[in-house]
Image (tube, grey):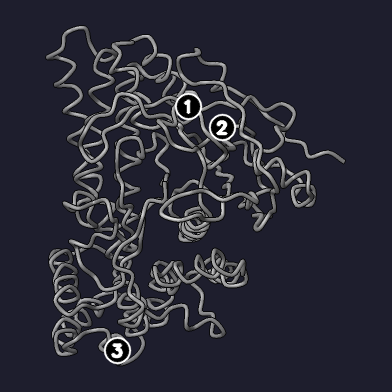
Amino acid sequence: MTVHFPFQNSYSALPDSFFARVAPTPVAAPRLIKLNRPLAVQLGLDPDLLETPEGAAILAGKTVPEGADPIAMAYAGHQFGHFVPQLGDGRAILLGEVIDREGVRRDIQLKGSGPTPFSRRGDGRAALGPVLREYIVSEAMFALGIPTTRSLAAVVTGEHVIRETALPGAVLTRIASSHIRVGTFQFFAARGNTEAIRALADHVIARHYPELREVERPYHALLAAVVARQADLVACWLLVGFIHGVMNTDNSSISGETIDYGPCAFMDAYNPAQVFSSIDEMGRYAYANQPRIALWNLTRLAECLLPLFADEQEKAVAEAQDILGAFSDQFSAAYQAGLRRKVGLFTERDGDEALIQDLLDAMAKNQADFTLTFRKLGDAAADDGTDVRAQFMEPAAFDEWAGRWRARIALEPQSAAERQAAMHAVNPLFIPRNHRVEAVIQAAVNDDDYAPFEELVKVLARPFENQPEYAAYADPPLPDQRVLQTFCGT
């Protein structure tokens, strides 16, 4: 049998200015190293066929499957606050779209599949390390319940790419509800092409927000919907200690999914100013800055949509500002509700926000591990809290706070077991610890050993469950294991 992709290509039916048609560059010797079989089934694909040499050739870009219409998408973007009028898919090619088993349209994109007209002197390839990182972290985010692009497959190409040294080449098959970004709108706004902005907005509404098609002011409603999704998304990031690392407008998805896992990382010790990305020298995208930057990015989207709001500039700006003004309250509501769940509060009372902030302040001062503090706080709902105390350099700091916390939870009727179960359902035990991810990458790159990668992916697929046989994966790094910087990989 032949591998079949039931492609539908709505984006490539848009005007030619939206993309460049380009085929993937064939590679020497593709070898499949990981197929996400459950995701393949969800997409209506045959995982057994994808695991054949024919499937590996497609997933590496060596063979273009029937029905595909390969394109590199055009977009612009603010990169660390500086506008670049043309970026685009420089090392990614969208093969096409499929309708999954839930009726959702999904992009199938090859990342690292060779140069495109947008490559800007780059080779269009990807090294194995960044491909494994994106596979690990994106699938971990999915298991954590956070909106995200996903990873269908990772393939080594049998070729090397040159970065600082020669590294094994690889291709990631990325799945997204779309790859449309704030930067996609900026591409046309920079060219004064209002009709293209309208066509793009109509496409986004039809694809992601079909409920808005019949409203009185659909473009206003579109901005409001994207604002709401981004507010919820960034709240989700903060609640698990995730730092995106490169929140440029070209990495801000209109669908509200996490996209582009470059120098991303999860915090170990809680630090609101934490930065891992080697290219974020000024801390623009630090952990606690992410809500502010999300609003900054949304403001750039609003600027693009102004011609669709009103003919009069002043009126359009006022209407956009009114919509953007909702972000702060929407983010705060999502974030504070998530924090209440993390500390086991089922109701909302005056003083809760201050109580939780006091815990965060004590965690920061005492270098408490973000993930384990909240996880073991769930156990403290049913025991004396010895394990959570151990996360603090000065356990007395926790004791003082815990007295007030216990008085607060005593005002609610839930049993200790009910509270513990509810807290464990939102506080993961396992996250992609940076040192674990790096160890997996080194084993694969240096020794062609994918067993550590397979095991880590397996553990992270069940982040909220106790897995005694893999208990060590929950441990924070030892001092000599700490990862202080992460890298983009391009």
Q: Position of residue 184 (x, y in %)?
A: 38, 26
Q: Which residue is mark 3?
A: 385
Tag on residue 434? none
Q: Name the amino acid, label 1.
A: Met
Q: Position of residue 56 (x, y in %)?
A: 72, 47
Is residue 323 toward the left or the right of residue 111 in the image? left
What is the CA distance from the residue labelled 1 to the residue labelled 3? 52 Å
Is residue 329 toward the left or the right of residue 457 in the image? left
Q: Which residue is mark 1?
A: 73
Is disc 2 placed on a helix, strand or loop?
A: strand
Q: Are marks 1 and 3 in contact (CB under 8 Å)?
A: no
For the point 28% across and 28% down, the residue is 84
What is the CA distance from the residue labelled 2 to the residue labelled 1? 8 Å
Q: Which residue is mark 2?
A: 94
Is residue 115 toward the left or the right of residue 381 in the image? right
Q: Position of residue 72 (x, y in %)?
A: 51, 27
Residue nearer the viewer, 401 or 271? 271
Q: Residues within 10 Å of mark 2 (few under 14, many from 20)?
A: many
Above or below, comparing residue 134 to residue 21 in the picture: below
Is disc 3 placed on a helix, strand or loop?
A: loop
Above or below, comparing residue 67 to residue 430 in the picture: above
Q: Residues within 10 Å of mark 3 (few under 14, many from 20)?
A: some
